[in-house]
Amino acid sequence: MSPDAMVTTRQKADELIKSLGGLVSYLNQFTDLVKATGFENVVGMN
């Protein structure tokens, strides 16, 4: 593997890790919202 390819691969991995981190953060916020308000209120079942 060339050095350029390694750098590109590392950059792509960093981007993926950042996007996954953002997703985890969003899921945590959603979970907190569900705990605070109740699942039915979030989904709008009633």
Image: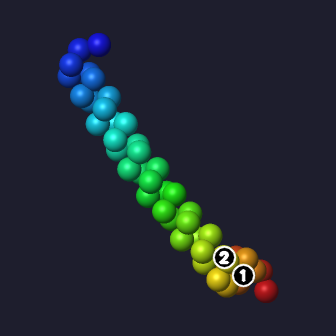
**Which residue is found at the position 20% from the left and 22% from the top?**
4
- Residue 40 position (above or below residue 8): below
Q: How many marks can you see?
A: 2
Q: Residue at x 29, y 13 (%)?
A: 1
What residue lies at 29% left-to-right and 36% top-to-bottom? Answer: 11
Local SS, label 1: loop
User: Compared to 44, does 20 lie above or below?
Assistant: above
The residue lying toward the viewer, choosing from 36 and 39, is 36
Identified at 38% across, 50% down, the residue is 18
- The answer, for residue 44, to whether it is visible in the render is no
Q: What is the crowding at mark 1: few (fewer than 14 residues within 10 Å), some, or many (at least 20)? A: few
How far apart marks 2 and 1 lie (CA) works out to 5 Å
Q: Is residue 34 left or right of residue 2?
A: right
Q: Which residue is tagged 2?
A: 34
Q: Which mark is residue 4?
A: none
In what element is the residue under mark 2?
helix
* Residue furthest right as drawn: 46
Q: Of residues 43 and 17, which is closer to you in this image?
A: 17
Tag on residue 38?
1
Where residue 22 appears, x then y in whole percent? Answer: 44, 58
Q: Are marks 2 and 1 in contact (CB under 8 Å)?
A: yes
From the top left corner, tell me how far across and down residue 6 is, in percent: 27, 23
User: Horizontal and vertical percent for residue 43?
Assistant: 70, 76
Q: Is residue 36 left or right of residue 7?
A: right
